[in-house]
Image (tube, grey):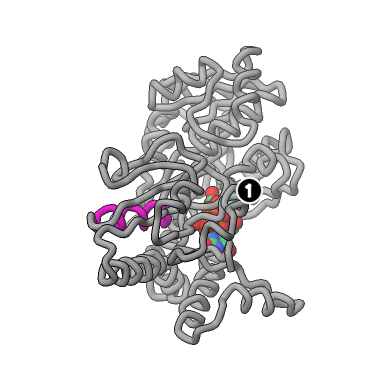
Amino acid sequence: MLISVVGLGYIGLPTAALLASRGMRVVGVDINPRVVETVNKGLIHIVEADLDAVVYSTVGKGLLRAVTDPEPADVFVIAVPTPFRDGTPDISYVEQAGHMIAPVLRAGNLVILESTSPVGTTEFLCRLLAESRSDLKFPLAGASEVDVCVAYCPERVLPGKVLQELVENDRVIGGLTERCTERAIAFYRLFCEGECLPTSVRTAELCKLTENAFRDVNIAFANELSLICDRLGIDVWALVRLANHHPRVNILQPGPGVGGHCIAVDPWFIVSSAPEQARLIRTAREVNDSKPGIVLGKIRGFANELKSNGVPRPGIACLGLTFKADVDDIRESPALAISEEITRWGDCDVFVAEPHLKELPGDLAGKNHVIMMSAPDAIARAEIVTLLVNHRQFFEIERASLANKKIVDTRGVWA
Ligand code: SAJ
């Protein structure tokens, strides 16, 4: 069996490598020639635990290779980005992937969409394939026999644990017909040790969005508590810890906002498809999106206080830039957004410590008043210490080094 994985990003590349490590022949397709070149050298362009070794060995054995133009295969797995732009989900990469694979489809093929998608995207993809290939029968309404099966199965893995969760997590699988669902389940059983749960295609699409909206709403609850606690002079971390002793309460952790390419984005897919109904989900997004501004307000308050006390250019240590602990991923990172805004003020020096990055990203790079250094050095040089990400390394910081500093601990590491 030859499997084609379209999109060699955070999901596609680990999936392709895992399948190849199980002895299957895999061809990865990516529109970016640099990605293709990197993978064909046995190297990787993203950071994900243990992925480098798996790609290196599977490419070496000739089981995994990458191309820019799709070729015929038995199964096509589409794992391309679906960003949210200007209030609407952008499914143009799915559309592009559909146009790319349509010419090489054959009777007997199985096409699976894994990208996080608004409800209706798999049906849209199927119609697009059918329009390009009138010689093949697709599972559109009323079709009894089909040549190409089409299904949706969302990826649900946690960055940093992708290879493990691809094998262990349960999968929700919705085909456009029962036969499509059965075939997709048989495919996932090749490598997935979790349960394969059959459902309709639209339920599978909404299921992924629901999981991330659930988490977002729960984080918003914790973030709202942090605002209430600030107002009432209560330590939110102690409050959450105590409340969580109740056997049926499990409050998540407040933070500087919600980042990553999933939880901060997916709820909007639901809101945009049912704006009048999704009131709580929208408000949760707004609460979480308001947190970086609130953190910035606290830092600005300290900076103003220092300036009025004769410190002309206060130094601010920004500890962490990534969207969450112990990863190198800065997509939609509130920590990065906060550091960039502090940099724009121009009247403070910024000392950035980010153990997972080699150089300053984005707007932080190339500025005289922004310097990257170790966390202890950043703390030593700063008057204000802002802890933005709870990286493992930051738990080892000597408490004594924080004496006499103005502290904004957004993660409760020093609570
Ligand atoms: N966060 C908090 N407080 C918490 C937990 C998280 O502020 O108590 C913040 C994090 O710092 C981060 C953001 O939320 O900025 C999201 O982090 P996360 O670890 O909750 O989630 P992701 O984005 O890394 O992965 C999620 C996962 N979804 C769920 O747990 C429901 C993962 O299973 C999905 O596969 C992934 O989204 C995805 O691809 O959709």
Quadrant housing residue 80 = top left
Kindly tell me whether residue 55 is visible in this rendering.
yes
Q: Where is residue 11 in the image (x, y as percent from the top left)?
A: 54, 38
Write the residue at 69% across / 78% down.
Answer: 242
Kindly tell me whether residue 208 is visible in this rendering.
no
Of 287 and 262, which appears nearest the observer? 287
| 391 up-or-down from 269: above or below | above
Q: Name the residue under label 1.
A: 173
Q: Position of residue 166 (x, y in %)?
A: 66, 41
| 34 up-or-down from 146: above or below | above
Task: Classify the position of the C terminus by image quarter.
Answer: bottom right
Disc 1 is placed on an element classified as: strand
Report the magenta stretch's main SS. Answer: helix
Q: Position of residue 413 (x, y in %)?
A: 58, 62
Write the residue at 61% across / 19% down.
Answer: 56
Write the residue at 47% across / 65% down.
Answer: 404
Q: Position of residue 196 (x, y in %)?
A: 71, 47
Q: What segment carries the magenta color?
A: 333-345
